[in-house]
Amino acid sequence: MMKNLIILLLLINFPAQSQSNFDYKWNGKKLPIDTLYSFDKIKDYLISEGRKIQVINFWYSHCAPCISEIPALNKLVEDSTLDEVGFISISYENKEESLSFVERYNFRFRNHHLNQDVINQNRLTISYPTTLN
């Protein structure tokens, strides 16, 4: 029970840590996009069909802060005992860059692709990394 409480507190505070200098309009709100594209071609992901709580991380492979936060994000996945929490990563990079990054750093979030224009037009991130729920 205590472990679940700690995880929930981390989830609530993670967006503030990643976007502390910005007024991030999507924090705690439904994103204006619903479909995320998967490189594994098994199935594209609909956010609305997912879990009750989504931890979403925007990153790119040459971002030093993105790389440095992976151990903490992986620990969050590892320690989560709540079935209703989903962990999603989103990158604008191509398939080779994304899959290489995920493999190299053993990033445990579900990896998805979103076109950079969609990210920019909807102002989904102001800086990298961005982590929200």
Image: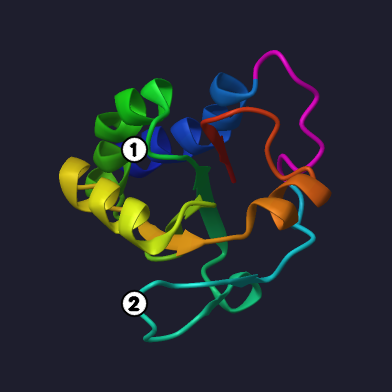
Q: Which mark is residue 73?
A: 1
* Residue ranking furthest to the top: 21
Residue 2 visible, this orientation: yes
Q: Earlier in the sequence, mark 2 or mark 1?
A: 2
User: Is 24 included in the stretch rendered in magenta?
Assistant: yes
Residue at image location 80% in from the left, 24% down from the top: 23
In the image, residue 109 above or below residue 71: below
x, y percentage for residue 82? Answer: 37, 58
What residue would you read off at disc 2? 40
x, y percentage for residue 102? Answer: 27, 50
In the image, residue 23 above or below residue 59: above
Q: Which mark is residue 21?
A: none
Q: Quadrant of residue 74?
A: top left
Q: Nearer the viewer, residue 60 or 68?
A: 60
- Neighbours of disc 1 within 10 Å: few (<14), some (14-19), many (20+): some
Q: Amino acid at mark 2?
A: Asp
* Residue ranking furthest to the bottom: 42
The Cα atoms of the two marked residues, 2 and 1, are separated by 22 Å
Quadrant in the picture for the N terminus: top left
x, y percentage for residue 120? Answer: 75, 45
User: Is 73 included in the stretch rendered in magenta?
Assistant: no
Dominant SS in magenta: loop
In the image, residue 25 above or below residue 113: above
Q: Is residue 97 left or right of residue 48?
A: left
- The span shown in magenta is 20-28
Element marked by disc 1: helix
